[in-house]
Structure formats: C-alpha cells, structure tokens
Image (cartoon, grey):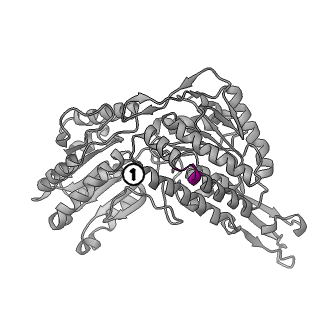
Amino acid sequence: MITGKNYIGNTLSANGSVTHHSINPKLNIPTDVPFYEATEEEVNEAINLAWEAFKEYRRIPGVRRAAFLNAIADEILALDQELIDAYTTESGLPEGRAIGERGRTVYQLRTFADLVSNDEWRENVIDEANPDREPLPKDDLRKTLKPLGPVVVFAASNFPLAFSTAGGDTASALAAGCPVIVKAHAMHSGTSELVASAIIKAAEKTGMPNGVFSNLMGRGRTVGTALVKHTNVKAVGFTGSISGGRALFNLASQREEPIPVFAEMGSINPVIITSKAINNRGEDIATTYASSITLGTGQFCTNPGLILTVESDKTNAFLNSLAEKTVAIEAQCMLGPNIKKSFVENSASIVEQKGVQVLGTIDGKLEANYAASHVVTVSGTEFLANPKLHQEVFGPFSLVVTCSDENQLLQIVNGLEGQLTGTIIAEEEEYSELYDLIDALENRVGRIIFNGVPTGVEVSPSMQHGGPYPASTDSRFTAVGTGSIKRWVRPVSYQSFPKELLPTYLK
C-alpha cells in the first residue's frame, strides 16, 4: 500500500507540510496520493540512523548480507501486480517493460548475493613476513577491501526499478556493507515507496540493523543537497543529467571532507557505419537502428544519438531508409511532462543549427507526453564547426553526420567528449583498416560494440557502464555488473598484526 510517507529506517514518517504528486504521463494527470517531502530533520535522522547501523552492518558476514539481498528480491516479487501497476502508471511505460525491468532488478540483487556469499570479491592479498630478508627484514602485510560508510543513491528517472530504489547502486552498496539512503525520484515516488517497503521487510526478516536502508521523498535539489553535505555520508551514486551530476560532484568536492560521487551522466553514444557496410546491408542496418533509436521512447542512457558515416553513392538512400523506418514506428509516451518539454526544446535546438536537415519526423498532433521521433543530418564540416550539435537529446532522436572521408570521421571521433559507448558497424574485409578508429574510440568511450546496438546493458563481471567525463565522473568504475561494488569500498592494509586480531578472511 502506498502511503506517501518517507521511510526513516523501518519507520514511516511524514513530518513536513510540503507535498508533491507523481504524474500519470499517459493521461497527463497527477496520481492520487500526495507524497510528503522529507524535512531537514528527517534527512538528518535517516543519515544518523544509517551511521549507527554502519557500525554493526559493516561487520555482518557476507553470507548474512547475501541472505538480506535475496530476501529483498523475494519481497519485490511478492509485491506482484501492485508494483507493476504503480510502475506503469507513473512511467507511461508498458507492462512488458515493467516485468522485464523487475526481472533485471531481482537478478542484480541475486548476483550481488552470490558475489558476497564468500570473501573472494575483497581481493585479499597476504604477503607474509620474511625476517631474514637482507638488507632489511620484511614485515607481514595483508590487504583487503572495507566499506566506506553510508551511501546516498539518487534514483534515475528512466529506470524506475533497475536504476532506482533497489537498483544496481543500492544492491552493490548493500552488498559491500554500506547502509543506503535513497533519494526517490519524484516522477515515480509511489513505485519507490513500494520497493522501499520490500527492502525494509527483508531487513527485518534477516535481522539487519535498523537504518540499513531509508527512502526519502523530495522534488528539486533541497533534499539531495542536504544529503550530500551531511558529514556522515561517505559516497554518492547518481544516474541522470550532466547538470544534476555535476552539481552533486561540486557539492561533495567542497565539503570539509570531500567524498566520491559516482555519477553516470550524459552520452550521445557515437555509431560509426562504414560505406561497405551500408553498401552490403544498409536496409538491415536501418531497420535495426530505427528500433534502437526508438526503444523505450529513446530514454536509454545508451541511445544511439550520433551516427557517423562517409559520403557514398548509397549513403543518401540509407539515410532516407533509416528516417522512414524510424518515424514509421508508432509514437510512444515519454516519462513525464518535464522530460517531454526538454526533448522538444533540445531537438529544436539541434534542428535550427546551420546546415541541419530533417530527414524524418512524425507529423500530426500527438497526445500530451508522446514524442515525435526525429532523424536529422548534417555534414561533417558543420559538425566540427558547431559544438551545439554535440549535445545529448534525451528521447527518440538521432543526428547522422555525413563525413567527406575517413580522415574527417576520425577527426570527429577524436574530438568528442567522453561517452558511455561507441559502436562500429563494418565488414570483415575491413578489419585491417579499423585499428586507428578502435584506438580513437578506446580513448573516448567505456564500451565498444561491434556490429550491434548500444541499447541494452548486460549485468555481468565484464560489463563497463561508464566512460570519460561527462559520461561519468570517474571512468575507472562501472555502474553495472559486479565490478560496481568497488565504488563503495577502500583498501586497508594490516601490518605485522597478530593473526588473532585479523579479519577472518585475512588469517
């Protein structure tokens, strides 16, 4: 049952007078329940409770934390249709997407449970003493990974489950031994409260300390700012806009004790399609990429927002085919009015730039929060001369840049800001010609895809979901997969310690 209240540990709280409603984007009306925004006192209470919980939770063995994570997965599944209905109502996304994302969320939780069920993830190193070493004896040294402390997680707008309340950031932080305070996204407050209730039930059933998890409501940046500035918060996870992520990064850096902010932010995810690939299978590529551009109404952080190719006899035919196939896909609902407004403004900003030509867009009147897909094109020369063309348009939009030759294409890739992904569509006979392009992409992106699409992020140890700034604030870490646990820990070495005093996994 959705109450509209905050979870301060295992207690529902609504001490403030400021409320907001989430929006049903398909109907363009507010949902029924008012959500109480957390007060400064409630923020402080949640963090202080998390700090006290951390003193116990960091020492709880991995097998018990694994049981906690598996119990969260079980309780999320137990919410059944109530959760699916809240998800679809607040997001405008279809039920099939909701069920699929719930499955991904449960899988992430169980994957981290498996990871921490033993201590191999800590990367323990034992370097035994050698008192007879010349010219100096060698001390016994042992190193492990230890949790940082309470973590604040900012829920993402575009994945109400998998990158939200019990998403990858929360799952990995809890697995590492860090209590979590979630700042719920105002667009899916009801969904967030339901998932929070599942986490609280799981914590109680598995004997976790009160305060190991809290869920706070709030629009704007007031609650988020208070969370990041609090001295007992030791790290931040964020998925969202460049402006939002950079604001949090700046706040955390200005603290007396700076803390890490692991923000996954903007990306236009360049896709390079060779002339030979267009000549040999242009229609198939157009079909595949029309689906990728419009998948989830283009509201994926890995949406292919920039396509690069070289002018050729068949380039124009390919571009027209891509545009036709893209706009032929039925218009879909966006996540909310503000996201639709930004999409309209940002796509219009690109279209009005010099040399930009609209190849295709959905014509006619659409429902309030539905998006008209866009495919537009510009020359490589104009793209190089105009930084405004490099901005991300969050939604079903892609800019196709036609380059004069391979050298100009390579110049564009080398000049891009950091990206989450880069994709190469090429033929086997071209492999020997791709080394310079691969080298350029390796310097600009976190993940390179070959003959595929960037949309879709596998949850696995080998996944890298991050990239050079502004794709993320720290390109050394991933936000997806088991490696994401490393964001919430730090190395600690023990020198010349009696074995009786060492952690069990270092003895």
**Residue 79 counted in the magenta span:** yes
Image height check: is 9 above or below 226? below
Kind of residue at badge 1: Thr
Q: How many discs mark residues in the rendered view?
A: 1
Image height check: is 260 above or below 431? above
How many residues crowd around disc 1 within 10 Å: few (fewer than 14), some, or many (20 or more)? many
Pinpoint residue 150: horizontal percent, then vertical percent: 70, 45
Image height check: is 302 above or below 442? above
Q: Residue at x 63, y 66 (%)?
A: 114
Is residue 214 shown to the viewer in this render? yes
Query: What residue is pinned by disc 1?
Result: 302
* Residue 436: quadrant of the picture: bottom left
Pinpoint residue 378: horizontal percent, then vertical percent: 20, 44
Pinpoint residue 253: horizontal percent, then vertical percent: 61, 38
Magenta part, dominant SS: helix
Q: Is residue 169 left or right of residue 157?
A: right
Say which of 139 and 280 sits in front: 280
Say which of 478 and 34 sits in front: 34
Pinpoint residue 78: horizontal percent, then vertical percent: 58, 52
Q: Residue at x 54, y 65 (%)?
A: 461
* Residue 455: quadrant of the picture: bottom left
Helix, strand or loop for disc 1: loop
Q: Residue at x 23, y 48 (%)?
A: 329
* Quadrant of the frame with the C terminus: bottom right
Residue range (magenta): 76-80
